[in-house]
Image (cartoon, rainbow, N blue to C red):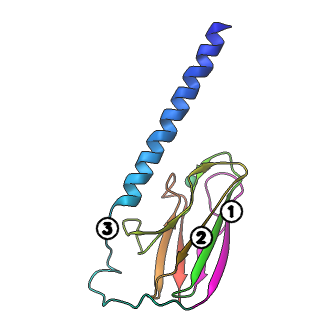
């Protein structure tokens, strides 16, 4: 009985440590003030809004895939993204201001274990048309897509 309780406690401590390590890794990724080719050398673009509001729902039903890997948005619009994680794995969606995840963060949802996890993030779409990457921070190779800004 005591052994079982101690075993459960040890598993809890281990799970907590793993989540903490993931959180630290994500914080390091998102806090780097990196600049990409999209940003470098480009003239300052006005921070004006197009006045548009756009909404996207991204879902992972199972495993480690996004249901959409291509999203379209209008330059300067306010984009609201809801991410639904219905898998048994930990995922988020992280949008970047460039074509690679080394660019600065546009918006990121909470890294959450599914199923039934939901989070919404809202951000200003870049004014410069182009292809902007989004990934899951836990699976940045398998879960990767493009936000096409026009
Ligand atoms: Cu993931």
Q: Is residue 30 above or below residue 149?
A: above
Labels 3 and 2: the sequence-earlier one: 3
Nearer the camera: disc 2 or disc 1: 1
Say few, some or many: other residues with alpha carbon within 10 Å of mark 3 (under 14 / 14 to 19 / 20 or more).
Answer: some
In the rendering, which numbered label is found on residue 59?
Answer: 1
Q: Secondary structure at mark 2?
A: loop
Labels 1 and 3: the sequence-earlier one: 3
Q: Secondary structure at mark 3?
A: loop
Q: Secondary structure at mark 1?
A: strand
Which residue bears the numbered disc 2? 69
Which residue bears the numbered disc 3? 34
Q: Tell me the distance, in whole angstroms, between the alpha carbons under discs 3 and 2.
A: 24 Å
Specify the segment rendered in magenta: 51-73
Which residue shows up at 38% across the image and 90% down it?
Answer: 45
Which residue shows up at 65% across the image and 13% down it?
Answer: 4
Nearer the camera: disc 1 or disc 3: 3
């Amino acid at each position: 009985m005591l052994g079982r309780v101690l075993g459960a406690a040890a598993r809890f401590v281990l799970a907590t440590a793993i989540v903490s390590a993931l959180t630290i890794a994500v914080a390091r990724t998102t806090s780097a003030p990196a600049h990409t080719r999209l940003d470098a050398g480009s003239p300052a673009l006005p921070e004006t809004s197009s006045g548009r509001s756009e909404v996207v729902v991204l879902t992972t039903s199972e495993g480690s895939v996004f249901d959409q890997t291509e999203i379209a948005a209008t330059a300067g619009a306010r984009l609201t993204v809801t991410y639904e994680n219905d898998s048994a794995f930990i995922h988020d969606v992280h949008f970047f201001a460039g074509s690679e995840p080394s660019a600065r963060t546009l918006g990121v949802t909470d890294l959450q274990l599914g199923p039934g996890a939901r989070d919404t993030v809202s951000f200003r779409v870049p004014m410069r048309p182009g292809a902007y990457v989004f990934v899951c921070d836990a699976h940045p190779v398998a879960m990767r897509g493009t936000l096409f800004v026009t």
